[in-house]
């Protein structure tokens, strides 16, 4: 099972999305870029599971784990459910911050508080990319050793991830629609939120693929010739 082409496709989706947002002139254009990138991720996930023989490969993997036809080994993996928990809390705070800026700039009667928001935005800009990256094997969510029958939860995470991507996509479109200002502070804060969302989705999918490949590679070299009758794993 070679996932190189899938990795290249995934990297291309993310890279092109970043370039499009960098060249966008309005919040609406940035939102269109995010919507496009996240839609491509939504399409990518089922394609990854079903194209190039991956469907049969995944079925074989689960059958092997379920029937105990392997020597139990450990896999170094990132807990994607923990990544989600941490990022959700972080994202909710960022989203609230961005909406406050939009509300401030939409209300022409509101006294400006640019200095305070600018300071907080600059702090967030300096921290966000590193923060999201650190959720996938870094300081905030380090890799841990897990038996393969536990590590497969990362693959199941990706199956359930599509609705979350759709929710983030709808939020991105909604934020663009709520802004009537062309203010630079609005554009920068919205752009930061959009990049953060796309970085998180990209990192989650990429990490799932890495876990899948690690499990597959171990099983590929450790399948026993004799079937162990004791059931070690059940799915569904």
Image: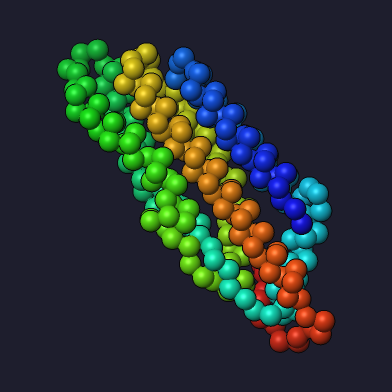
Count of number-bearing discs = 0
Colour setting: rainbow
Q: Residue at x 66, y 45 (%)?
A: 7
Query: In this orientation, which residue lies closer to the viewer: 60 or 210?
Result: 210
Q: Residue at x 57, y 35 (%)?
A: 14
Question: Image check: 68 left or right of 10?
Answer: right
In the image, residue 169 sits, relative to residue 83, either above or below, namely above
Q: Residue at x 38, y 55 (%)?
A: 140
The answer to whether residue 141 is visible is yes
Residue 188, image x and y in percent?
37, 24
Q: Residue furthest bottom?
A: 229
In the image, residue 156 sits, relative to residue 37, either above or below, namely below
Picture quarter with the N terminus: bottom right
Question: Image check: 98 left or right of 83?
Answer: left
Q: Residue at x 62, y 72 (%)?
A: 149
Question: Image check: 171 left or right of 116?
Answer: right
Query: In this orientation, which residue lies closer to the viewer: 44 or 107?
Result: 44
Picture quarter with the C terminus: bottom right
Residue 24, image x and y in percent?
49, 18
Residue 197, image x and y in percent?
47, 38
In the image, residue 204 sits, relative to residue 148, either above or below, namely above
């Amino acid at each position: 099972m070679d996932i190189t082409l899938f990795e290249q496709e995934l990297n291309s989706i993310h890279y092109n999305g970043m370039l499009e947002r960098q060249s966008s002139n309005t919040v609406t254009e940035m939102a269109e870029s995010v919507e496009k990138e996240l839609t491509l991720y939504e399409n990518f996930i089922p394609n990854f599971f079903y194209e190039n023989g991956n469907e049969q490969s995944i079925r074989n993997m689960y059958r092997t784990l379920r029937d105990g036809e392997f020597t139990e080994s450990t896999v170094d993996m990132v807990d994607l459910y923990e990544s989600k928990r941490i990022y959700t809390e972080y994202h909710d705070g960022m989203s609230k911050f961005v909406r406050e800026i939009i509300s401030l700039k939409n209300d022409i009667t509101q006294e400006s508080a640019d200095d305070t928001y600018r300071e907080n935005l600059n702090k967030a800009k300096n921290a966000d990319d590193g923060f999201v990256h650190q959720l996938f094997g870094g300081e905030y969510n380090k890799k841990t050793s897990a038996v393969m029958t536990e590590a497969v939860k990362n693959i199941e995470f990706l199956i359930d991830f599509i609705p979350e991507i759709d929710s983030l996509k709808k939020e991105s479109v909604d934020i663009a629609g709520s802004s009537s200002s062309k203010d630079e502070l609005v554009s920068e804060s919205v752009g930061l939120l959009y990049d953060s969302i796309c970085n998180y989705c990209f990192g989650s999918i990429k990490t799932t693929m890495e876990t899948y490949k690690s499990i597959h590679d171990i099983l590929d070299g450790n399948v026993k010739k004799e079937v162990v009758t004791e059931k070690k794993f059940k799915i569904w």
